[in-house]
Amino acid sequence: MITVVIVDDHPIVRAGMRAVLERCDDIRVLAEGGTGGEALRLVAEHRPDVLVLDINLPDQNGIKVTRKIKAARLPAAILILTAHDEAALVFDLLESGALGYVLKDEALETLANAVRAVAAGKNWLSPSVASQVIHRALTPQEDSNPSAHPPSSADASLTAREKEILALLGQGLDNTAIAERLSITKRTVQNHVSNIYGKLALTSRAEAVLYALRHGLAQVSDDA
């Protein structure tokens, strides 16, 4: 059973999402709220598997809430709900620790699948957002940060295990999911990720995803 908390400042939107999710036998909605403060309180209180979070809240935006939840080491996977599909915003959210990004105009049709994906530690992007991620990854000249797209030969210094972990990062798996996939400890994964960042001059998870996509180590699926 996947447990969920929904936070959106529009009661009608929350009701629609709850109705969709509660029709699923494998998903249970524990609570809902309308502000960033309530998101933090409800996640700490209920410790859900997934937080479905609107990016535009009256007291603080979804990026700040995501960062606070990750800083507090709360276990919820974060699925962002928004009307915006700007590539820069997507990468800010991925870097902050969100795993999924669902557009409101398709949320009710895809929400359950998105919740299942992030609960399993995978990225889930709405199709139009996924296409922007791939486009940005494959066009380095559009990136302002050169460390996000080092030379193609840079990964020659990576060990076989580091390349394997970089590929899994590119597929959207978090450290816990990678550890389970490779049957190693989370601490070992963290050490490998630090080594990857150092060798490739990367500074964030979003840059690692970009690198893996650009160099053919991973692909972002736009399937719902």
Image: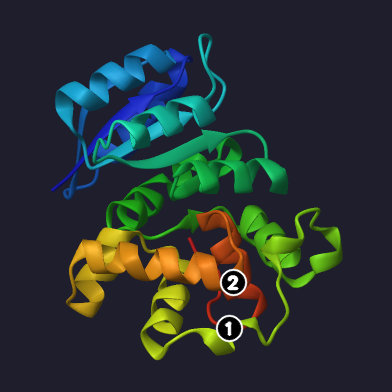
The secondary structure type at the circle numbered 2 is: helix
- Is residue 119 shown above or below 64? below
- Which residue matches tag 1? 155
Instruction: Looking at the image, tell me whether mark 2 or mark 1 is earlier in sequence order.
Output: 1
Amino acid carrying label 2: it is Leu
Amino acid tagged 1: Asp
When asked about the image quadrant of residue 79, the answer is top left
Report the residue at 62% width, 46% height from top: 90
Considering every residue shown, the one lying at the far top of the view is 59
Q: Nearer the viewer, residue 160 or 66?
A: 160
Residue at x-position 31% and y-position 54%: 116
Query: Badge 2 is on which residue?
Result: 200
Q: CA distance from mark 2 to mark 1?
A: 7 Å
Q: Percent x, y for residue 96? A: 50, 41
Give percent across and percent down for residue 34: 41, 13
| Neighbourhood count class around disc 2 (C-alpha, 10 Å): few under 14, some 14–19, many 20 upward | many
> Which quadrant of the view contains residue 43?
top left
Q: Secondary structure at mark 1?
A: helix
Q: Is residue 130 left or right of residue 72?
A: right
Q: Position of residue 186 (x, y in %)?
A: 22, 62
Q: Residues within 10 Å of mark 1 (few under 14, many from 20)?
A: some
Left or right placement of residue 168 versus residue 217 in this view? left
Task: Identify which residue is drawn at 37% across, 64% down.
Answer: 173
Pointers 2 and 1 in contact (C-beta within 8 Å): yes
